[in-house]
Amino acid sequence: MIETERLLLRPLHVSDVDVFVELHIDPKVNRFVGSFSRQQALERLTAIQRQWAERGHGLCAIELKSSGEFIGRSGLQYWEQFDEVELGWALRADHWGRGYATEAAQACLDWGFATLDDEYFTALMRPGNEASVRVAERLGFAPRREDHLSGRPVTVYAVDRPAKLPAT
């Protein structure tokens, strides 16, 4: 469990299938991250749970501290094809513009650098996803290369592990 000022983040679980499908059914959201049938969502959530068990990280549910309401997902996703870990986020459209994506992603990024040995994390941006590009840039990500994911072009943004401060 990761806690921020306004949010709670916890590993996604197959029991989140209904809210996961609901998040991704919105055309404003799935334009960049795709949609899932219930069966596809169960398979995806099973894979997320497996990644948590095998790699010690994965995607998290984002819930409002004030109400427990599920508002999206964020976390660290390992992509075997790149041998890299991506920081991702997706929020329900009715919660856009409030800083939740940046708050959740920053918490996951900080947790990732504190917990994992990776020298950098990526953020994969589909063309036109300007809102997520702005979040990535606020977090210190910069474009690193062009690539393809699932046959679609992406710009791979990355942020390097912060330099360690000298001991005092």
Image (cartoon, rainbow, N blue to C red):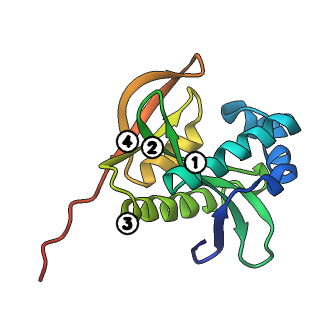
**Residue at image x 76%, y 49%?**
93
Numbered mark located on residue 85 in the image: 2
- Badge 4: few (under 14), some or many (20 or more) residues near its Cα, within 10 Å? many
Q: Can residue 168 be seen at all in this image of the molecule?
A: yes
Judged left or right of residue 3, residue 73 is right
Q: Are marks 1 and 3 in contact (CB under 8 Å)?
A: no
- Give the CA distance from mark 3 to mark 4: 17 Å
- Looking at marks 3 and 4 on the same chain, the residue that comes earlier in the sequence is marked by 3
Numbered mark located on residue 51 in the image: 1
- Residue at the spot of label 4: 158
Amino acid, disc 1:
Gln
Judged left or right of residue 17, residue 142 is left
Which residue extends farthest front? 54
- Looking at marks 1 and 4 on the same chain, the residue that comes earlier in the sequence is marked by 1
- Residue at the spot of label 3: 114
The kind of secondary structure element at disc 2 is: strand
- Give the CA distance from mark 4 to mark 2: 10 Å
**Residue at image x 40%, y 64%?**
115
Amino acid, disc 2:
Val
Asked whether 113 or 39 is in front, the reply is 39
Q: Nearer the viewer, mark 1 or mark 4?
A: 1
